[in-house]
Every structure is written in structure tokens, then in C-alpha cells.
Amino acid sequence: MPAKYELTWDASNHRWRVQHAGRRYVISCRQLSKWAGQPVPSTKEGSYRVANAWWDEKRAEIDGHRGPHPHADTIALLEAKRDWARRHGQPDTAASLTEKIETTRRLRADDDPDPEWPGEVIAIARSSGIIIPDDLDPSIARMIFGEGSIWRDRLQRDATTPLPDDLTIGGQVATWTTLQQTKVKAGEISPARHANDRIALHHFRDFLGTESPVGSIDETKWTAWYGYVLSKIGERENDPKAGWSRDYSAIVFKVGKAFVKHLYQTRLLDHLPRNLDAYRIGRTTREIEVMTTEDVRRLLDMATDRVRLYLLLAMNTGMTQKDLSDLQSSEVDLKAGTITRKRSKTHKEKDVPTVTYQLWPATLALLSTFKAEGNRALVTSSGRPLVDKRIVDGRLRAKDSVATAYKRLAGRCGVSGSFSVLRATSSTLLEEFDPSGKIGTLFLGHSPRSIKDKHYSRPHQIAFDEALAWLGRKYGVTE
């Protein structure tokens, strides 16, 4: 299906614009990222679906302050059909009806909201000798030959007393989302993790139907959900702009499974589907991405002192952007020339090691220059955290000054890969120094892989210091 653009693309400014009701509306890809709670590519093909979704929401907000739509009755009927499809696990039908709703909302008062006749059925009827006037009113034709009677029967059968919101899929998704937001505030999960899980869970919610009862989740629905996710993978394999990647599909499927278990644990679901563990979505096996030492030297040579410090800390201590932002002054010993800490991502886990990194002279010199006075050892030039991710009005708001600065630098140097590739590069190089992998595991701040490693054979600090010194020479940073 060809791409459907609701707005006009402004390539020079990486933004979308649209004229509506005498006013002009503009939104950039950066603003779309904030609205969606996840990164949006600064390209036409990579951002148009999110732009369409934003405009649907914005237009609904605008039109809500105006008079009733001239085709309000048709829209209401289409919405009722769409809701029925969602409740009965027919996502493709629901998607088709959603598209019809949006098309109808764009019609003027003198436009026919459903100009298509059931022509194929009429042709068959005429071939059977049934006389049908050419000037037959379209609404009567649709009533006789269309699906009107089928939908009337469906909607009448489904016209029961609405379930309480807390017994519907949509209601419980909202409750679960609120709980996750509480976990974010308590530091149990990251804002980015919550934002990604929320979007993934909405896919599951939309598949089952927002108004569907919680108790409708059974073995049949779970099998259908598995098939739906697989179909999304198939779409992507046929068209790189359609469907979902295998890795993203695995995340969506995993979040759906966690939600089903949550419903069971809170006694909202009497029984888990017996086939809950029967299906899985395997993730793509990828090679670890690393840089050449020449690329690393080019980055260091062209970086400003502040950004060079970020690079050296990633190379010397395996820090990510989050680690840099969370680095505490109490973890830095300038006199000893060391940093001692656990990784930010896993600092609450008991078996994750606290690691002391001996800093290279170049790293120590720059850290002494840029170390802040407060609790955070490193902040921006304006005194803000290097990485600031939070949930605002249910959506992720993220600022990552390290990633932004690195992206600009890498672009100027012609170097591919993200900031985290530096950490992977150092870990890979350390395998040359210690093929057993113990030094590399400690460098990454990972928990020991075996019982023996955990209790008996953590590398001695002297050996670890020697490994870091060797790594500095390998990069050409130390002599």
C-alpha cells in the first residue's frame, strides 16, 4: 500500500506542515519525538506515520471546539463498528474502519460519506435476472446489497450493559501504566523503559480491544496474538518501512506476556492461558559493533576538551551516557586517580561488582578540569544533568547532551556507531589481554558468569590496573 501523507513535508527544516480551517500548523521531527515518547527519524519516510498520528490527535482537539461534523452520524456508526472489531479481536477490520473514519472526517457537507456501491454484488444480482434501476438511491442499494444488515445484527447482539472500566482491557492498561509511572518515580525502572513498555502494551491493548473484558484473554486469543506479531515481522521482511522488526516484535510480545501475568497475579484473570509459555519471538543475533583504533584517535583529535573527557571515560571505564550523568563526586578520587562505582543500570543488584578503575593521565587531567562541585561529578556547562529523562503527562521527555555532542562529532569525523560502541570496543580489545574474559567482565561491571567466578576468581586489582594501562597503550592514549 502506498504511503499516505496527511501533512506536507518540509525537507529543508525536517518538519511537517498542514493548513486546516484557515490556520497553519507545523511540527518538527524533534517535537514528534517528544510527543511520541520515542526517537523519530528526521526523514520523510521515517516520520510520516507518527506525523499522521499526531495530526489525527491535534485535529480532533481543534475540531472539538467547533460545531458538529456534517457527517457526525456516519462517523459515529463507523466508530461503533471499529469498536466492535476491536472487542472481537479483528485488528485488520478495525484498522480499515479507522481509515474510513479519518477519510469521512475530511469530507465537506456536500460530499457523500460512502460513495461506493456494492457494485460487484449488484452485477451478480443483475446477471441473475434481478431488475435494479440505474437511479436507485445509494443508501437503499447499500441497505439491500451491502453489509448493513450484518453490522446491524452484530451491533444489536453486542448492545449489552458496558463493563466497569476496571474490568476492561483498556482500564487495566491504564492502571498498569499508572503503576509503572510510580515505579519510575521510585527509581525502580527508567523513564525510557516505561515509555517503551507503554507503547508496546498499547499494541496488545488495541489488538484485544480497549473495551474487551479482561476475562476474554484465553488460549485462543493468545495464539491469535502470537500470529498477529508474526504477521508484523512478515510485513517488515517484505517492506522495510512496514510492520515491526524482529527485535521490536520480541519486546512487544514480552510486554504483552508480562501484562497477562500481572492480571493473573492481581486476581483479575482466573486462569493463565495454558499456552502462555508455548510461543516465543527470537531476537536477531548481531555481531558486537566495535571501532578501529584509528577511528577512536580521529574522534579524540577533533573533540573539544569536554567531549574528549566523555570519550576517554567511556574508553577507560566503560561508561555509558547514563553512567557519566550519574557519576557521583564521592566515587571520584582525584588524588588516587581512580573512579570506584557500580554501573548505573544494575547498581541495585547484589551480585554486580563495585569496580575501581585506574584512570589514564589524560582522563584524570580532564576530569580534574571539568569536575563539578556538587553531588554530580559531571554536569553540562549550564549546571544541568548530562542526561535527563523523565515522564511528563504520561510521555517520555528526554535530553541527552552526551549523545547529542557525540553525534555531531561522529558526523564531522565520518565515524559510524553510537557512543556505547566505545565501551564495546574497549571490552573487545581487553580480550586480547585476557582471553579468559574475566577482565572484560569486570571492566563492563557485569556480574560473574559462573559460581566459580562469583566466589573464587575475581581478577586481582593489580592485574586489572595492568589491563587498563595496556588498554591505554593500545589506543595510543598512554605510553
Image (cartoon, helix red, strand yellow):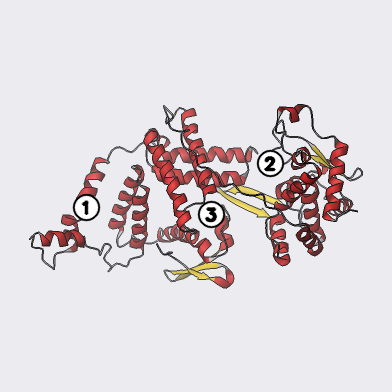
**Which sits earlier in the primary sequence, circle 1 or circle 3?**
3
Which element is circle 3 on? helix
Q: Is residue 42 left or right of residue 51?
A: right
Q: Residue at the location (79% across, 27% down)?
A: 456
Q: Which mark is residue 345?
A: 2
Q: Amino acid at mark 2?
A: Lys
- Graded by Cα atoms within 10 Å as few (under 14), some (14 to 19) or many (20 or more), the crowding at tag 2 reads few
Q: Residue at the location (69% across, 59% down)?
A: 404
Separation (CA) of disc 1 from disc 3: 37 Å
**Which sits earlier in the primary sequence, circle 3 or circle 2?**
3
Q: Indicate the quadrant containing the N terminus: top left, top right, bottom left or bottom right.
A: bottom left
Q: Is residue 416 left or right of residue 113?
A: right
Q: Residue at the location (36% across, 65% down)?
A: 106
> Which percent across, then down, holds residue 56?
43, 59
Q: Amino acid at mark 1?
A: Gly
Circle 1 residue:
148
Q: Is residue 206 left or right of residue 183?
A: left
Circle 3 residue:
36
